[in-house]
Image (spheres, rainbow, N blue to C red):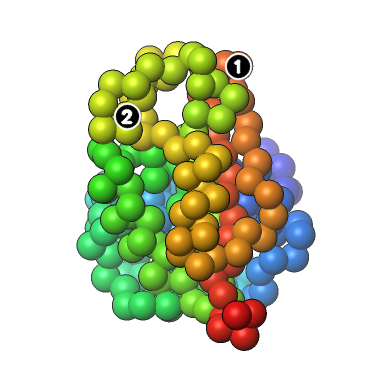
């Protein structure tokens, strides 16, 4: 039997759930999930009147999220979920109130691709909108990782990821002219990997 909270929120990332509990989002806002997979982070938004879109490189994942959206909202336009890379997604500038990049940016192959992915995500955030990212970092495990070239590191869990550090996150926030909504937070998973939450707001121009 499905727990009522799971029915309401799905298998949502706990740190995105934290942002919901803090009242960051409002019904009717437009949401884009980058690397949406089967839609685990979208159940709440689909059930609560948000205008939801997603992209993923995996056609099977896109089909799953389309099926899920139709179960929640019969008649929901399946074309809101698209097979695409982050860099080539079919959206124009500043369309979304919330852009989610959950466990996707660390799959960049080098610094150039990471920056291309980050800038593509940031450009579709509306002024006053939020960018939410969870990504692998070296924070707290720098002594346990090995650089293998092009910003890629081998982690103790045997995987290779493009890793950021705190200085990089703060510098990107500044260079993008964003504001941290709250301090960056990092979870270390049994000294095997480190996942950092990065939440920032795009300035409206009124703050400047």
Dot 1 alpha-carbon crowd within 10 angstroms: few under 14, some 14 to 19, many 20 or more:
few
- Seen in the picture, residue 17 relative to 75 is either above or below; the reply is above
Dot 2 alpha-carbon crowd within 10 angstroms: few under 14, some 14 to 19, many 20 or more:
many
Q: Are marks 1 and 2 in contact (CB under 8 Å)?
A: no
In percent of the image, x 26 and y 33: which residue is there?
150
Where in the figure is residue 158, as x and y percent of width and height? 38, 15
Which sits earlier in the primary sequence, circle 1 or circle 2? Answer: 2
The span from disc 1 to disc 2 (Cα, nearest Å) is: 21 Å
**Left or right of 9 on screen, residue 53:** left
Where in the figure is residue 38, as x and y percent of width and height? 42, 48
Image quadrant in which the C terminus is located: bottom right
Nearer the observer, 143 or 36: 143
In percent of the image, x 49 and y 14: which residue is there?
144
In percent of the image, x 40 and y 71: which residue is there?
124
Circle number at residue 152: 2
Residue 42 visible in the picture? no
Image quadrant in which the N terminus is located: top right
**Residue behind mark 1:** 190
């Amino acid at each position: 039997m499905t727990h009522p909270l799971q029915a309401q929120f799905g298998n949502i990332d706990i740190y995105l759930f934290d942002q919901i509990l803090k009242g960051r989002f409002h019904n009717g806002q437009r949401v884009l999930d980058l690397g949406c997979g089967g839609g685990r982070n979208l159940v709440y938004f689909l059930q609560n009147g948000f205008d939801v879109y997603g992209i993923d490189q995996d056609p099977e994942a896109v089909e799953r999220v389309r099926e899920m959206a139709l179960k929640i909202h019969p008649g929901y336009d399946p074309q809101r979920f698209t097979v695409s890379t982050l860099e080539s997604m079919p959206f124009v500038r500043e369309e979304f109130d919330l852009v989610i990049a959950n466990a996707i940016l660390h799959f960049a192959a080098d610094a150039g691709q990471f920056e291309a992915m980050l800038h593509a995500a940031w450009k579709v955030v509306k002024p006053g909108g939020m960018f939410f990212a969870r990504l692998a970092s070296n924070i707290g495990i720098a002594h346990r990782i090995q650089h293998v070239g092009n910003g890629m590191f081998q982690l103790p869990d045997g995987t290779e990821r493009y890793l950021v550090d705190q200085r990089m996150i703060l510098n990107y926030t500044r260079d993008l002219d964003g504001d941290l909504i709250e301090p960056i937070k990092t979870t270390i998973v049994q000294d095997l990997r480190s996942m950092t939450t990065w939440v920032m707001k795009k300035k409206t121009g009124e703050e400047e």
